[in-house]
Image (cartoon, rainbow, N blue to C red):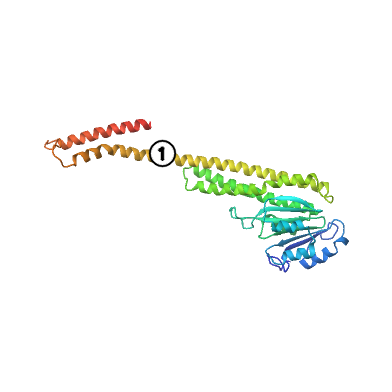
Amino acid sequence: MAAGSYGGDEAGLICGYLFDAGAAEPARAVESAQAAAWLATAGEAPAGAYLWLHFNLSHAQAERWLVRHAQLSDTFYETLRDGLHSTRIERADDSLIAVINDLHFEFGFEPSDISTLWISVGPRLVVTARTKPLRSVDALRTAVKAGDAPRSSTELLEHLLRAQADVLVAIVRDVTARIDRIEDELLAGRLDHKRARLGALRRLLVRLQRLLAPEPAALFRLLQQPPGWMAGADADELRGSTEEFSLVLRDMQALQERIKLLQEEIAANVNEDNNRSLFVLTVVTVLALPINILAGLFGMNVGGIPLAEHRHGFWIVVAIIASFTAVAAWVAFRKKR
């Protein structure tokens, strides 16, 4: 597997590990051929041993290999094709089928950088499948390569959920830091399209919350009637992972409320600036009104124009205009105060 590409081997297998707590090497990397041979004799494997296979569904041979060797529930294949990406965990025969939404490995704070991870968990086999590189499953693979060997398939699922929760916590921290910078710039009076940036962050949080919110409830329902092969300690650990998700989702809700308040503050500042600009325009128009009226009257070129022959007529008209302008300015600024 070290020589294989990240897209998977000839069967679309990205990585595979055989876990056996009683062996000298608790977690041993396997290829697709070795995995097929182990699955064919899984009934003779030591108690507690299980296999984790992670597939790239973009590979044409991945689903065919699973159908030929994995003997998964038909519900798993139906879930792959139904097009529903809402997060859920349900029982199918004697296994667990999970649909989890995760972040792309190259996450750029865009709502489109979220994809689905399909999981099938049984007592002897755990299958994870995706179409694009995802952060949580890659973090789990890194932990296994570093020596972390979950003792059961349920504990592997719990490790995956905790890795996803850690990724979401990191996103919440990054979003909080961005909001802090925007808030500091807002207090400093430098608006510069901050409202659009806040809107993008808010849409991201809403999408994450919508895709992830059903997960704690689904897990709690599942844990009320767990499969017979699931140990009580494993069920408790899964319950703890749901609590972490609930905390992260509450933090996301708090961030959404904070972004909403900042957007309202920015909108109020924009309205205040617009009102100030409109007032200045109104004052200029009012102050120019007397001179415009008199200029129109004296420019009609008809007989009988007053002060036309008076030696001080120009200065008299200027005084009249200045007087009316002063009165108009007093009225305008008086209303402003």
Picture quadrant where residue 75 is located: bottom right
Please tell me which residue lies in front, 93 or 164: 93
Q: Quadrant of the N terminus?
A: bottom right
Residue at the image position 84 percent from the left and 65 percent from the top? 40
Residue 12 figure quarter: bottom right
Above or below: residue 62 compared with residue 196: below
Find residue 126 and report its horizontal and vertical position in percent. Answer: 77, 57
Report which residue position mark 1 lands on.
Answer: 275
Q: Is residue 239 visible?
A: no
Residue type of the residue flagged with mark 1: Asn
Q: Whole-percent x and y of residue 316?
A: 18, 34
What element does badge 1 sit on? helix
335 to the left or right of 182: left
Q: Residue at x 59, y 45 (%)?
A: 176
| Placement of 266 over or under 118, stated as above or below | above
Q: Residue at x 27, y 33 (%)?
A: 326
Instruction: Report how many numbered discs are placed on residues in the image.
Output: 1
In percent of width and height, residue 28 lies at: 79, 62
- Residue at 74% of width from left, 52% of height from top? 159
Identify the image quadrant of the C terminus. top left
Which one is in front, 309 or 303? 303
Residue 36 is at least partly visible in this image: yes
**Residue 290, x across and y down, in percent:** 25, 36
Seen from the viewer's position, the closer of residues 195 and 58 is 58
Horizontal relation, residue 215 to residue 258: left or right: right
Q: Tell me where residue 147 sits by quadrant.
A: bottom right
Residue 177 falls left or right of residue 11: left
